[in-house]
Amino acid sequence: MGLIIANVKKRPTRTIVSILAVSLGVVMILLFVGLTQGMLKDSAYRTQNIKADLLFQPPGSSLLLALNNATMPIRIKDKLLEVDGIRHVSPMLHQFSKQSFSLIFGIDPQSFNQVSGDGIIVMEGRLFQAPFECIVDDVYQQSHHTKLGDTLNILNHTFTIVGFFKSGIAARILVPLETLQDLNDSKEKASIFYIKCDSDSRIEPVYQHLLHVDPFKGYNVTRASDIYKVMASNLPGLKEFTAAIIVSAVLISFLVILLTMYTTITERTREIGILKSLGASKGYIVNLILKESMLLTVVGVGVGLVLTFLATRVLHMLYPSLPFEIRLEWIIYVAFIALASGIFGSTYPAYRAARQDPVEALMYE
Amino acid sequence: MQDIVTISNLTKIYRIGKVDVPALRGVNLRIKRGEFIAVMGPSGCGKSTLLHIMGGLLSPTSGDVLIEDRNLGRCSDRERTEIRRAKIGFVFQRFNLFSTISARENLQLARQIRGNGTFDTHTVEEILGILGLQDKMDHKPLEMSGGEQQRVALARALINRPALILADEPTGNLDTVNSQIVLTMLRDLNLRFNQTVVMITHNSEAASYAHRIVEMRDGQILRQPRSELLVEHEDIFSR
Ligand SMILES: Nc1ncnc2c1ncn2[C@@H]1O[C@H](COP(=O)(O)OP(=O)(O)OP(=O)(O)O)[C@@H](O)[C@H]1O
Ligand SMILES: [Mg+2]
């Protein structure tokens, strides 16, 4: 162990570079997975909290509202209300605000509360009553340090913040549906209908009806219980992209550890000869190299975790509404991946070292 | 007394590309337990090759090398490693200490490779005492003089109490004073622990510390010189 630590210390730059490479992989994977999972979970959570039984959207649209702006005529609402088993329908139109990097929902409070039950809980101030009034949730309030009466620019129009509502539902910024329709050039349009059924037992029949019977056929209908799943599948290329990130992280660690250990054993050819002259077996030498690379990767994982933590902190300060979800199982998974790439990266150098001819190694300059 | 090394008809041919380089051509040698032997001869005559084969670092082309009762020529690489670990201690001209760790850690490493067999701390203290190293143990090799480094290397070779010490020009990099110190120590250790030593040297003064001098030429051992006969006679008289 003393020898391993001495070796690692002897080339501080190389050691730091390989540790950083491993930690970079860890940070990449954890941040990406943490952010995508966190965002998915957060929007699924907020959508679920609306407590609609079914979500009804235009054909080809996505549950990840930031990714699409398809709309449909608002009169479909009346058709939906005619369906047997549907009790309430609430239209919503959304707009993604690049300025605040968040979604803005235009809602109709009356029908929204019918669907939602508890609905929107205004903790301070009041609900909007005039066209250019809006309410924001407490997360937005805290992160932007807003007070009642402050203004907000949406689609080049100034809105006055008249209330703060309890976060965890819908979007962080809510405005009157009609106002958003006007500003958005979407008069009489909605991007989603929230549907409440007569009772839980009516959900499935209504769902099947909407799926298969004209004029609803072709529209996107989602059950509340499927929201997370559908969102995850709506994120285009999520799986592929996650896999690509993991593969690149693994490759970086693997190659850097390979290079590090390879140069290490070349540089220490003589020392390997000495070890052999002292009676060290092949296994001993393999073990030594593997342990050294393990040390690098373990420290790399540790540094990676610390950097990930710092990065989420910084991101949280810059974008307080960015939800991160870094779960223990992913940390374990990533640590495992890093260690595995460390082991694989050092296998070939270890094998080379173990096979060194001792006499030649002892003569190596 | 039992022979610790028995070499018969040993040959070693190096192959460089398609050219055969014979380094040993039929070496026969017996070494008794507790003997201190000096191997001399011109450069390239095969001294190091012989030593490496005796230590199991190199496999012979033909012939037998018995260390106690194990025939190295018939051993697998793994078995030779084991024999080396258990019975051989090397000392090199270039000291070959690990420069990144202290003298103490160098010795610990040798012990650790040997495995945690019963270890007599008393003997270790005694060895360090004889070598005069107690207060240098926490220095790194580069913080020591050549003579001190070679003494550490000697301690490392001795620490596992090997049956056989193989030294390849141990004083080749030392000045006269340090050479004398190291040689005296080798002789003291040989006397005190009945430690068998085979030492290659180019220096006849160094060789004079040995009981017996083996002369090599062109991969063979010359007929035993008179000095050996003298030593053997002395032995007989001293009994
Ligand atoms: N790895 C090798 N490959 C090819 N030939 C070698 C190798 N090692 C040694 N030889 C050759 O074998 C012969 C004996 O070499 P060896 O090193 O045993 O000589 P030596 O007596 O120790 O010489 P020196 O006193 O210079 O150390 C020499 O001719 C040398 O060139
Ligand atoms: Mg030599």
Image (cartoon, coloured by chain):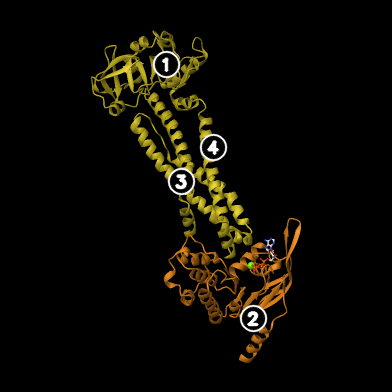
Chain colours: A yellow, B orange
Which chain letter goes with mark 2?
Answer: B
Count neighbours of disc 3 (C-alpha within 10 A) and say few if under 14, some if 14 to 19, many if 20 or more.
many
Residue B70, given in percent of the width and then of the height, sits at 67, 71
- Residue at image point 54% right, 37% down: A247
Dot 2: element? strand
Badge 2 is on which residue?
Answer: B212
Which of labels 2 and 4 is toward the front?
2
Badge 4 is on which residue?
Answer: A247
Badge 3 is on which residue?
Answer: A300
Residue B138, given in percent of the width and then of the height, sits at 43, 66
- Labelled pair 4, 3 in contact (Cβ < 8 Å): no
User: Mark 4 or mark 3, which has the lower sequence index?
Assistant: 4
Q: CA distance from mark 4 to mark 3?
A: 17 Å
Residue A117, given in percent of the width and then of the height, sits at 33, 21
Badge 1 is on which residue?
Answer: A192
Which of labels 1 and 4 is toward the front?
4
Answer yes or no: is residue A245 visible.
yes
User: Mark 3 or mark 1, which has the lower sequence index?
Assistant: 1
Which chain letter goes with mark 3?
Answer: A
Label 3 in the same subunit as label 2: no
Q: Nearer the viewer, residue A237 or A230?
A: A237
